[in-house]
Image: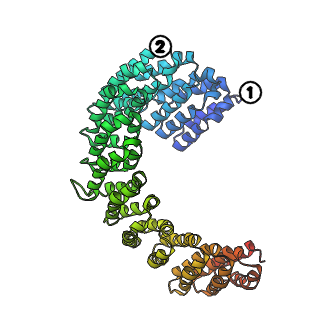
Amino acid sequence: MAGADGDDSLYPIAVLIDELRNEDVQLRLNSIKKLSTIALALGVERTRTELLPFLTDTIYDEDEVLLALAEQLGNFTMLVGGPEYVHCLLPPLESLATVEETVVRDKAVESLRKISHEHSPVDLEVHFEPLVKRLASGDWFTSRTSACGLFSVCYPRVSSTVKAEIRQHFRTLCSDDTPMVRRAAASKLGEFAKVLELEYVKSDIIPLFTALASDEQDSVRLLAVEACVSIATLLPQEDLEALVMPTLRQSAEDKSWRVRYMVADKFSELQKAVGPEITKSDLVPAFQNLLKDCEAEVRAAAANKVKEFCENLPEDSRETIIMSHILPCVKARIFHLELVSDTNQHVKSALASVIMGLSTILGKDNTIEHLLPLFLAQLKDECPEVRLNIISNLDCVNEVIGIRQLSQSLLPAIVELAEDAKWRVRLAIIEYMPLLAGQLGVEFFDEKLNSLCMAWLVDHVYAIREAATCNLMKLVEKFGAEWAQNTIVPKVLGMANDPNYLHRMTTLFCINALSEACGQDITTKQMLPVVLKMSNDQVANVRFNVAKSLQKIGPVLDSNALQTEVKPVLEKLATDQDMDVKYFAQEAISVLALA
């Protein structure tokens, strides 16, 4: 291929050309992924003079091949000779930044941003900045959207004349005819503002921000809300009221729910950016309106921020604001006042997940007087997720007022969730059982909740039975071996005679989990005889689980029990007709060193 003289220096590029022209996409993709190896074989000079021009000329391929190429080129600096020659990577990446597929363009921009830092200031002006200008004034919207992501990386390191040109290009893109370009510019507005001098933030960025926040497309307006956070952090406090707040007020009342949703979603960040005084005068009323919004998605987003918003309020007026402004809105949603008792379960669920956190902010007396009725109301909600979110956050309330205040209302809610038709709801309540047990105490648990924990062991869903087994182990760790011996172990061992083989297997799983927590005495005297007896079970699945259980509990037993009781049973199982039983018995003999 490379000639009769045996010079095979062209071989790597020839193979690459062959593979990149192959009809098989996977072969072309693999070839691109090996680019760095090929570049190493060629050396830096031939990579610059042969490989890169070839790649630039052949950028017409499947998107996944182009994506791999865009990613590879971002790591090519040393393969073209280091920072001095990094500008050689710009032509192929420029082409990739103009393709139709968004993912490829984004990856090309990411690689361009990466290699921009490796350009010297001179190279940045000579090579990189002209590329940004070409993209910014391209005929197709694809190149103009890519340009938006590159302004901020070259701006800080160029001369003031070039800076002025970059600002002008960015202004032009912010008022582009194509919504996709304006959207890209809006998404990078905050990032670009961070690298600008303060005077230009005021003179250039603020008018752009105001214009984008009033754009006819809601997809552009909502991105301006994100930029608002960055811009507000850059401006001195005295400028915020005049320059940012009119636009933010307008966004909080925007006719599109998506824009209002974005304001609700970014509320805590906005609150930190604008400071305590504006929070009190402007953001508190805005937050109240978002909690009462006509769109459920907006209410849910605001509800999720209730705790965080309250935590970030200025300390001197925090309690007053919560009691007089925030809590009435929350109560309205829960107690069917105004337009709510929110019928939307996402809103109720969001409130339930954060409202418990207010107890630590408001203290004992306010919690008992104002929050307790809300918790109790939500514990009776028809939506299981709401009840579950309250129960999962009980530890917040327990720290402030103690869980006893809630115990009578908790019980019916726990029982209902424990028997819910959706197995994932049952699974979630099991996971909170050790926490509840620790807070309610052993007597309350034995009286009210013990039977629930045992019922889960025979649930028809395996995941529930498995979780119930882990739950028992955590309870024993919490309440001690003596409690286990009197309360749990007899019930678990009783299941060994259950006609359903799945329940008999659950006995073995429980023994595996409990043996270590219960200790040697209980394991040897009470659990081991049951396991040994089950080795004669008619179902092979039970028998091989006996072998696995003996392997698991073996380290807890003394050597006498192992030799006289466990070894004969494992040897018998090792000659079982079933292959799996044999395998697990032999494995147990080997692990316990009984051979």
Q: Position of residue 331 (x, y in %)?
A: 28, 55
The answer to whether residue 583 shows anywhere in this view is no
What kind of element bears circle 1?
loop
- For discs 2 and 1, the disc positioned in front in the rendered view: 2
Residue located 34% across and 34% down the image: 278
Q: Is residue 586 above or below residue 371?
A: below
Q: In this view, does 79 lie above or below 291?
A: above
- Disc 2: which residue: 160
The furthest residue to the left: 338
Q: Position of residue 415 (x, y in %)?
A: 39, 73
Q: Which amino acid does label 2 sit on?
A: Ser
Q: What residue type is labelled 1?
A: Asp
Q: In this view, does 188 lie above or below 384?
A: above
Specify whether 419 is left or right of 57: left
Residue located 53% across and 70% down the image: 471
Q: Which of marks 2 and 1 is nearer the N terminus?
A: 1
Q: Quadrant of the N terminus?
A: top right
- Disc 1: which residue: 5
Specify whether 332 is left or right of 317: left
The answer to whether residue 476 shows anywhere in this view is yes
Q: Quadrant of the C terminus?
A: bottom right
Q: Position of residue 460 (x, y in %)?
A: 45, 76
Residue located 47% across and 32% down the image: 60
